[in-house]
Image: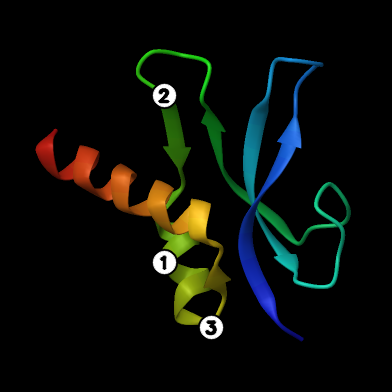
Amino acid sequence: MAVRLRLTRVGSKKNPIYRVVVADSRAPRDGRFIEIVGRYNPQTDPSTIELDADKVEAWLAKGAQPSEPVARLIKAFSDKSEKA
C-alpha cells in the first residue's frame, strides 16, 4: 500500500481550506484517509500552516511520501518554526 501525505479540500465554495492528511494513494482526494496531521489556510495573510511535527515525522519515517504541495508546506513550516 502506497501511503502519501497530501491535501484534502474542506471549506465552502470559493473559500478553500485544506487538511494535511495521510491517505492511501489510491483513495480519492476528498475521500478516505488514515489520519489528519495538519491544516493549511491560504486565505489568510500570511497563509496559516499548522502541522503536528511529531506525526509528520513519524509518517515520513514509516515511508509515507509527501505530495509536492505538502513537501513545500513542510519546508515552509520548518523554516518558520526555526526562526521562532
Label 2 crowd (10 A; few <14 / some 14-19 / many >=20): few
Q: Quadrant of the C terminus?
A: top left
Q: Quadrant of the N terminus?
A: bottom right
- Residue 7 sits above or below residue 49 on the image: below
- Residue 24 sits above or below residue 39 on the image: below
Label 1 crowd (10 A; few <14 / some 14-19 / many >=20): few
CA gap, disc 3 to disc 2? 28 Å
User: Which residue lies at the image location 68% right of the left edge and 75% below the top edge?
Assistant: 3
User: Which residue lies at the image location 86% right of the left edge and 65% below the top edge?
Assistant: 27
Query: Where is mark 3, residue-wise?
Result: 63
The image position of residue 54, as x and y in percent, is: 41, 58
Element under label 3? Answer: loop
Instruction: Identify residue type, mark 3.
Output: Gly
Query: Where is mark 2, residue-wise?
Result: 47
CA gap, disc 1 to disc 3? 10 Å
Label 3 crowd (10 A; few <14 / some 14-19 / many >=20): few
User: Which residue lies at the image location 64% right of the left edge and 35% below the top edge?
Assistant: 18
Q: How many marks?
A: 3
Q: Nearer the viewer, residue 81 or 40?
A: 40
Q: Nearer the viewer, mark 3 or mark 2?
A: 2
The image position of residue 21, as x and y in percent, is: 66, 53
Instruction: Identify residue type, mark 1.
Output: Glu
Q: Earlier in the sequence, mark 3 or mark 2?
A: 2
Residue 57's label in the rendered image is: 1
- Residue 56 sits above or below residue 73 on the image: below
Element under label 1? Answer: helix
Q: Farthest residue in the left direction?
A: 83
The image position of residue 34, as x and y in percent, is: 76, 62
